[in-house]
Amino acid sequence: MIRSELVQKLADENKGLTLQEVERIVDLFFKEIVDRLASGGRVELRGFGAFTTRARDARTGRNPRTGEAVSVNAKRVPYFKPGKEMRERLNTR
C-alpha cells in the first residue's frame, strides 16, 4: 500500500471527512513521528510497534562499481520493532 491508497481508504471509511482533510491528518501523523524521531525520541503505537533510531558509527565503505574506498559518516537511522499483536498476526496460518 502506498500513501495515496492509505489516504483514499481512510476517506472511503470516513464519509464525514473530505479527501483533503484526511490527507492533512495523514501528513500530520507522519510529520509528528518524524519530528519525534529527529529529536531523539521514541514513538510507540500499541499493538502495532515502536519506532526508534539507532546510531551507526563512521566506517569505510566501498563503491560497488569501482571498488574504491569511500568514507561513510556516522549517522542515526530509523528502526522499527513490531509489536506482539503484529508478530502474532503475521505468523498465524
Image (cartoon, rainbow, N blue to C red):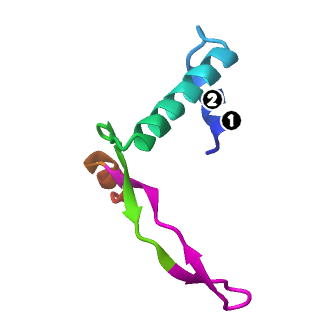
The picture quadrant where one finds residue 15 is top right
Residue range in magenta is: 60-82
Residue at the image point whose x is 61% and y is 45% from the top: 1
Residue 89 covered by magenta stretch: no
> In the image, is 18 to the left or to the right of 35?
right
Residue hosting label 2: 7
Q: Is mark 2 on a helix, strand or loop?
A: helix
Q: Which quadrant holds the C terminus?
A: bottom left
Q: Is the magenta stretch mostly helix, strand or loop?
A: strand
> Could you say which quadrant of the image residue 6 lies in?
top right
Neighbourhood count class around disc 1 (C-alpha, 10 Å): few under 14, some 14–19, many 20 upward: few
Rendered residue at 67%/89% (across/down): 68
Q: Which residue is drawn at 67% across and 85% down?
A: 64
Relative vertical location of residue 67 with respect to residue 39 in this rendering, above or below: below
- Amino acid marked by disc 2: Val
Q: Which residue is drawn at 64% across and 43% down?
A: 2
Judge the density around disc 2: few (<14), some (14-19), many (≥20) Cα neighbours within 10 Å: some
Question: Mark number for residue 4?
Answer: 1
How far apart are the alpha carbons under marks 1 and 2? 5 Å
